[in-house]
Image (cartoon, grey):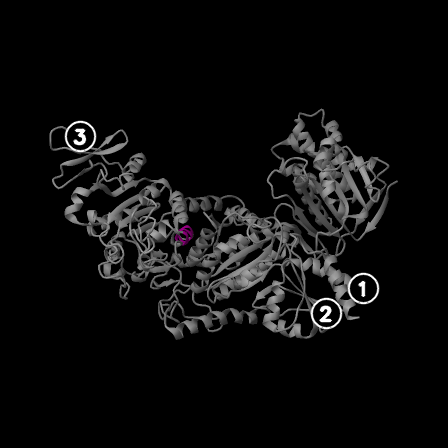
Amino acid sequence: MKKIKFLDEVTIRFAGDSGDGMQLTGTQFSNTSGAVGNDVNTFPDYPSEIRAPEGTLYGVSAYQIQFGRKHIHTPGNKIDVLVAMNASSLKVNLSNVRVGGIIIVNTNGFGEKNLKLAKYDTNPLEDGILKKYQVFKVDITAVVQESLSGTKMSPKNIDRTKNMFALGMAYWLFNRPLEPSIKWLQTKFAKKPDVMESNVLILKAGYDYCASKDEYAIQYEIKPAQMESGFYRNITGNEAAALGLVIAAKRANLSLFLGSYPITPATEILHFISSYKPYGVKHLQAEDEIGGICSAIGASYGGYLAATTTSGPGLSLKIEAIGLGIILELPLVIIDVQRGGPSTGLPTKPEQSDLFMALYGRHGEAPLPVVAATSASDCFDTTIEAARLALKYMTPVIMLSDGYIAQGTNPWKIPDIEELPDLTPQFVTEPEGFEPYKRNPETLARLWAVPGTQGLEHRIGGLEKEDITGLVSQHPENHQKMTEIRAKKIANIANDIPQITVEGEQSGDLLIVGWGGTYGAIKDAYDKLRSQGKKISFCHLRHLNPFPKNFGDVLKRFNRILVPELNMGQLATVIQSTFLIPVLRYNKVKGLPLYAFEVEEKVNELLKEKE
Amino acid sequence: MENILNDMLLKPHEGTLEYTAKDFKAGIDVRWCSGCGGYSILAQVQRILPSLGIPKEKFAFISGIGCSSRFPYYMNVFGLHSLHGRAIAIASGLKIARPDLSVWIATGDGDCISIGGNHFIHACRRNVDLNVVMFNNEVYSLTKGQYSPTSKVGQVTKSSPLGVLDDPFNPVGLALGSGATFVARGVDSDAKFLQHLFERAAAHKGFSYVEIYTDCVIYNAGAFEPWRNKALARENTVMLEHGKPLIFGENHDKGIKLDGFTPTVIDISNGHYSINDVLVHNENDSTLAFILANMTYNSDVPRPMGVFQAIEKSSYDTKVTEQLAFYAEQPGAYDYDLLLKGEDSWEITG
């Protein structure tokens, strides 16, 4: 009789060689966990090499999932269950496995050659270094070969089903249904019935293997989380951003144009958008980053909701064109999926170090709105917010994501499109009284007059404009005036965005201020500290320019402000210079996401200091 | 699909399409130097636009930076004066988004093939339906006289006081090599011929590129004298006409003959050669276009002017439009529910 143990949350990590299919295994496990009602958060962690040499330490590909019956904000830190398909994947991940945690190993990946590639002098499965863990050894390679020996599958394809065996084992361990993955395999391999049947067989074999062996004595059960009713799916930040663009265009009654150039980790947005042809979306994979943004400016001039997507090095190249967008006062959504820098830096790793560039990285006085997404699924809402501001205020807007939320997933409650804000802009149609730089008195946005509108023929450009007429002007007073108008237009957006809300005490000793993709880690840390009775408060920024109207007042109600961020203190610097208050910092630039325990430790240290 | 742009586009043009050149003139002073070749180019463009039968509001002139890029300000149509080198990229986005527009680019040798070179070659290859008017004056003028990518070796400029060291681009060859479907060259002083080239460029569905030898009277005066000066031009220019032999000279007595792939000059008046030996131009022959383009810096042969190549090929913007039209007819088109739910959604009921 197997025992069932109930848990609140679990972190599982599937790790193997790049070719072992760990990303797929992880995706399936997280989708099934979502489908049974758990809250889920995932992070894929794969090498930047396309096909790193087999079995090597730098060829390890992993997919980490935290799932639970409470709200899950991060993919977890310490690993409860590690599935290691070879020696290298054990070596790379072992230090993150919780003492007492479960390790499932494919013993076939621990041969002499594997051990050498993993730089193990002795076999870790035999030398006792794993005695602090519950280790389950199975020769997955041999089992799948035996199970499929009678089939027409080639040895190579048989070997490829290993990941389904591991998935089946994980499903047994956490008492998950096999049906969602079987259904998925049936659709995925509809045209290759051999492959489909073999994979289903092996998935079941993995499940049955655990069920039949006595050493697998305990199953774990994670009850469903309290999720609002509705339809959900696990979504990456990049897919959410792509969908955000399409839906923003729909809500604006405009067509969408994306001008983009491939760059890690933003490229998937281009992939998704290029697959949206059935929704009338146009895109151009431009010759370079500059061509990407410039084509988008051309489409915006032509009356489209236009966007460009990139990462730090690409944003650097787009900066001159962003300035053009600002003086032309045309709407444009710029999505920057941040990665470690400077230069090529850490192309696949997250960082929040483009904040200064987003806020200030232009020549001349060139303010624009900056928003930042807080999670994978929030990339949808934040992209729509970026489009709303761009269209309403006739301005380029930068939406900051990062490599962590862009590639990680969490369950996204699929919205009712009709309930999203109406973003429909107004084109000028009447020539009577038309002037290119006449403004809406409330928003200060200039009017949008698109080519093709009879009687509105006019010229605009990058030279300073005369107020109202838009004619070229070098008049000293006019430049001062136009600079001030452009600044005021952006600053006034503070009246049109939600005030910031503070969790915990509304005033007092310590306020944690976060922004962007670190929300999950800070929120987890905050929740844990609060549950221990610590008197701290937390707020998280989505709007970085302008700040919410009450932000300064909120900051002044606390004795100490702590800003954890994945850079050397960029938001902290902005807050200090804007509000003239001292800010405590927690800065991490390791190419890794922020972890909850790091924030906890920092806060505990600060609380101790006070005592 | 509800779309506010489509609503606007459905509005019919009101009134006449009978324009004159004057309708295309913006009411502001043209501020090029007196004697600048730009004046002629501007005038010829304004002269031919009325003949195209296109409503005035459907024209968009995009430019980058440089003397030539002032062009849109002088045109009474939609105009955008953008960034150095970026006009073609902006125009590409505009044309792909708005295939209903007639999109023109005014650019120069620096703007088009130096700082904007990458956008230029890719727009050529993509065959976006744009009309590029390239003012080649073989010098940077707006920045007051530095050498450009078309300056001659040895040319003395403010940034090459001892003479230019690097070889120039052959702009026509660059356009051909990059896959441009319509490639032509003219001289600013030949008004009628420029009008002809602009009409051809406008009629061409796809990327069209017209290079114009443009005299910069301040920083490179006389650079094009052999082709601008009518008397000299007869000996130094061979006019390209589709289906016609390549004849030139004061008395129309010289021709171009291909010696293998090498163009050579022959005398057809001395009885040794006849008109039958002369190379006949074919705008649809891309190999020939390259040979003709290679005559550009060859002092043994006259310089070809006219249409080097005009080949029909579906334009990029047309292909985009067709692709979307195809998908719009497929089952599931505009099914936003399907888009948002994807393949792996699940329902949670409370």
- Nearest to viewer (mark 2 / mark 1): 2
Amino acid beneath label 2: Leu
Residue placed under numbered mark 2 in the picture = A510
Q: Position of residue A171 (x, y in %)?
A: 76, 42
Picture coordinates of residue A33, whole percent (x, y): 72, 48
Q: Tell whether B182 sits left or right of A218.
A: left
| Residue to which mark 3 is pinned | B276
Which tag, 2 or 1, sits closer to the chain's start? 2
Chain letter of the residue carrying label 2: A
Label 3 sits on a secondary structure element that is helix
Answer few, some or many: residues within 10 Å of disc 2's Cα (few below 14, many 20 plus, some between 14 and 19): many
From the image, tell me which residue sits under label 1.
A532
Mark 1: few, some, or many residues within 10 Å (few <14, many ≥20)?
few
Above or below: residue A488 compared with residue A213: below
Q: CA distance from mark 2 to mark 1?
A: 15 Å
Q: Which residues are magenta?
A: B89-96
Q: Are marks 3 and 1 on the same chain?
A: no
Q: Chain of mark 1?
A: A
Hey, what amino acid is under mark 1? Gln
Q: Secondary structure at mark 1?
A: loop
Q: Residue at x 81, y 38 (%)?
A: A136
Residue A601 location (% of width, % of height): 75, 60
On residue A606, the disc is none
Which residue, as the protein is rendered here, is positioned at the far front?
B162
